Amino acid sequence: MRYLTILCVLLISPTSFANKKAETSKEEASGKLITQDKVVSTFSDSTGGKVAIGLYDSSNLITGQSLSVMLSSRDHWFQTYIGVHRASGGLFEAGLGASYKFTIAGNRFTGLHLGPGITIGSAQHGTSNNEAFRLSLNGIFGAHFTLFERLLLSVDGGPNLVFLKGDESFTFRPAGALLGLGIHYLF
């Protein structure tokens, strides 16, 4: 996963990688131990990056894309998201969700995660403009990595059990149409 992340950094910003490489060469010359994490992120587990705000592709979890806030504790993320898909013609589709992302490999800045999630909201039911209460229980599995020291990217997917006006459905798919892509800025 680290090599994939390094490749993305190389493709997106060759000048910033050259600067990092020059810094790495200076640090190697001075006898310091260098890790690959230096290229991806300069945060350590004890400093910075405990709050992230951004956009989350949650269209398969709630009825549309959402605004998201993520809070970190050591190697885990707690994510909340809210989205309003439609509010016209007597139909109001909106949702609120939360998920806990437990890091199983790597750290909170680069790695693989899994965990539970839940969403509630309203969604269109049937072909008419009838809205109904929607509850969704989710299993989240995905990857996350940090670019440019402050940009946290993630992709999520997994099992999704939806209850909508007496109908239940079970699917296994990405969290959204863009593979559950999340783009967050770290504070």
Image: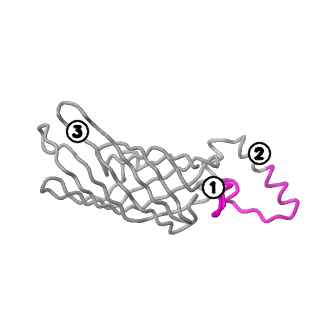
First of labels 3, 1 by sequence position: 1
Q: Within 10 Å of the Cα at label 1, are there few (<14), some (14-19), or many (20+) other Cα atoms?
A: few
| Residue kind at label 2, given as amino acid type | Asn
| Residue kind at label 3, given as amino acid type | Phe
Disc marking residue 48: 1
Q: Is residue 123 left or right of residue 12?
A: left
Q: Is residue 47 left or right of residue 184?
A: right
Residue under the point 14% across and 56% down: 167
Evaluate if marks 3 and 1 touch, with contact meaning CB atoms under 8 Å apart: no
First of labels 2, 3 by sequence position: 2
Residue under the point 71% across and 43% down: 16
Q: CA–CA distance between discs 3 and 1?
A: 38 Å
Residue under the point 27% across and 36% down: 86
Q: Which residue is mark 2?
A: 19
Q: Secondary structure at mark 2?
A: helix
Q: Position of residue 98 (x, y in %)?
A: 37, 56
Q: CA–CA distance between discs 1 and 2?
A: 22 Å
Q: Which residue is mark 3?
A: 92
Displayed quadrant of residue 137: bottom left
Q: CA–CA distance between discs 2 and 3?
A: 50 Å
Q: Is residue 78 left or right of residue 32?
A: left
- 55 in relation to 170, above or below: above
For this rendering, which residue is in front, 94 or 59? 94
| Residue kind at label 1, given as amino acid type | Gly
Instruction: Decide whether residue 91 is among the magenta residues.
Output: no
Q: Secondary structure at mark 1?
A: loop
Q: Position of residue 129 (x, y in %)?
A: 14, 37
Task: Tell me which segment is drawn in magenta.
Answer: 22-47
- 105 in relation to 17, above or below: below
Disc marking residue 163: none
For this rendering, which residue is in front, 148 or 178? 148
